[in-house]
Amino acid sequence: MLNLTTQQSLFILQGAGWTILLSLIGFVGGSLLGLPLALGLTAKSMATRLATGFGINVVQGIPLPILMFAVYFGAGLAGFDPPTLAAAALAMTAYSAAFLAEIWKGCIRAVPRLQWEAADCLALTSLDTLRLVILPQAVRIATPPTIGFFVQIVKNTSYAVVLAFMELTYSARIVNNNSNEPFVVFTIAGALYFLICFPLSKLSRRLERSFGKTREAAK
Amino acid sequence: MTDPIVKFEDVHKRFGTLEVLKGISLSVEEGKVVALLGRSGSGKSTALRCVNGLEKIASGSLTVCGRELGKMNVDLRRLRQDVGIVFQSYNLFPHLTVAQNVMLAPIRVRKLSKSDAGKLAEHVLDRVGLSDKLSCYPEQLSGGQQQRVAIARSLAMQPRVLLLDEVTSALDPELTGEVLRVIESLARERMTMILVTHEMGFARKVADQIVFMHQGRVWETGDRSLLANPQTQELTQFVESDL
Amino acid sequence: MAGELDFGFLSDYWPAIAWGVVWTFVMTVASLIPGAAFGVLCALARVYGSPTIARIAAVYVEVIRNTPSLIQAFWLFFGLASLGLRLSPFMAAVLALSINFAAYVGEIIRAGLEATPHGEIEAADCLGLSPLQRITAIELPQAIERVFPALVGQSILMMLSTSIMYQISAEELTGVAWYIQSFTFRSFEIYMIVAALYIGMTGLMRAALSSVGLLVFTRYRRLRTPL
Ligand SMILES: Nc1ncnc2c1ncn2[C@@H]1O[C@H](COP(=O)(O)OP(=O)(O)O)[C@@H](O)[C@H]1O
Ligand SMILES: [Mg+2]
């Protein structure tokens, strides 16, 4: 590519691979942790709601780079020496969980109250109500914003540079140090991010529109 | 006799392939009240909206306050200073107080000073009986009060003709009276008005001329006695359906 | 190195930390204001602009929102310098943050503008207001009020993202923390402190912006109902 050697280009591409991997780990981890948190935010018990909300606000009030440092050096202090991927993944998980929980809270709330009541009338247990009635609909509502948030996850993996983890941004920095072609290198890196993110953004919007239409048709 | 303020001559209007006005001819003299009646979909709103340029006519000629609207370069903003319109849904600006709603156009369009506009607002709101609501927001008012504010907002532009499109249709029955009384008092003050209404009794009371529209045409027209002795079957049915 | 927490370094380094807080604040405000203004322009361009202008604004928004702000900062700081346009770290950081903020603000306000009831637009036109008068007096103020909570959230995210700008050696709190830990090796402790400071700043910013909202939206202040 332009003034870069094949090796340098491959290095950047490899970084894109790590970016995707870190994004996926962050997303899966964030989902596993975010779902119970979302349920906590919509729980009947006020104490549960407040406690969950407090935890989420704390994570959302800390910049991701600091979160990454805290995880990495916290593990160090506890006697571990985690690979940077693990530390970054853990921080991404916490970050994603906090935001996904809030997004999903909105989606669970958006399932009309009537459905809860109808399910109550059918004498379903509240776990069954959640599993059989509410969640399937919430998932439908949640898909577009969740994909939209995945784009944020991909972009925010770039913060893993602070741990010198070899994702796309850090790879680009290294190639830039060797080639001294910052304009080319960072344009390419930006383009690669765009190639990953833009189709997802588009998909998210398309789904949102089509869901919006079916919802209106249902009225 | 002066020229009419509004004059339709063989006006046609289409939405795509649907011909909504099929040759309307109608004159409104200064100081007169014309009531447009007719079934839903007969083209009353469209005719009214042509008068202030919200809809463009396809052919024929439409003269409003001395301007011929078929012509290319009509200054719509100037036209709309002469022609006020009030809609079924009051369309007040919810983020502005009642007084601000009324003062906005006089300040921005007529370039009145704030204090002059304020006095004007007090005056027109007094005319619609709402001088105690100046600093309220629209959502704090009943539907009837909001509609009276909308009328006051139009009056503040001191229009030469006022268009009213089913201004009581969205209101609960017990709130229509207060709005109709305002319109009645405007009629007494010789405000030129074209009003589309379903309130036939009211039309009979205030209108100098009644126009019955049917399928995009002026089907029958006459003075307030028209409704008592309709000539066509359509108007007969229309009058009976109201009972 | 497993060990115990030691905050002893604070006695020497608290002025540096305070300095970092101040610069984070300065960088945030310096990006917030032009970013918001440009965001409003973006929204207007997309809603009212000619097809070409709307298209340009859309491309801008997509490019910015689908690339990381750190890459944009590198591009502005290192990339432009290699082309001969040398920005100071602070300038490059503020520029990157503002163009980012603008792209998000643009989309948020656009949603607010598109929620304007058609009847209000018609009413404004019928009163003889010019399109510009209608937009500035009727549509934009309500659009901003409608989406204000989202704007506050976006502003806080922007403040948090100042933290990455130490990567182009712009001065702010995270950069200070990094510098302190490189001397003291009390990495975990300093980042805990800084995390707490950011949480505090997030709370403060939310409170401050909400107060601005109360100050500006007089109707909301009186009635407390959403628009
Ligand atoms: N903007 C529009 N586009 C397409 N058709 C319209 C539009 N406005 C009105 N129409 C049609 O024109 C006809 C007359 O409408 P309208 O003037 O609103 O009647 P009225 O006010 O007498 O009920 C109706 O069939 C209506 O569906
Ligand atoms: Mg109508």
Image (cartoon, rainbow, N blue to C red):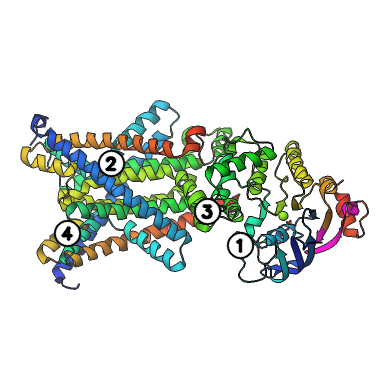
Q: Is there one chain holding both mark 3 and mark 2?
A: no
Q: Amino acid at mark 2?
A: Ala
Element type where label 2 sits in the image: helix
- Give the CA distance from mark 4 to mark 3: 50 Å
- Give the CA distance from mark 4 to mark 1: 60 Å
Judged by depth in the image, the label closer to the viewer, 2 or 1, is 1
Q: Earlier in the sequence, mark 2 or mark 4?
A: 2
Element type where label 1 sits in the image: helix
Q: According to the image, label 2 marks what residue? A: A94
B181 on left or right of B97: right
Q: Amino acid at mark 3?
A: Arg
Q: Of A63 and B177, which appears nearest the observer?
A: B177
Q: Is there one chain holding both mark 2 and mark 4?
A: yes
- Give the CA distance from mark 2 to mark 4: 24 Å
- Give the CA distance from mark 3 to mark 2: 45 Å
Q: Amino acid at mark 4?
A: Ser
Q: Quadrant of residue C5?
A: top left
Q: Is mark 1 within 8 Å of ligand 1?
A: no
Judged by depth in the image, the label closer to the viewer, 4 or 1, is 1
B68 on left or right of A47: right
Which mark identifies residue B76? 1
Query: Label 1 near label 3: C-beta < 8 Å?
Result: no
Query: Label 4 near label 2: C-beta < 8 Å?
Result: no
Where, quadrant-wise, is the N terminus of chain C in this rendering?
Answer: top left
Label 3 CA crowd tier, 10 Å (few <14, some 14–19, many 20+): many
Q: Within the magenta stretch, is there residue B120?
A: no
Chain containing mark 2: A
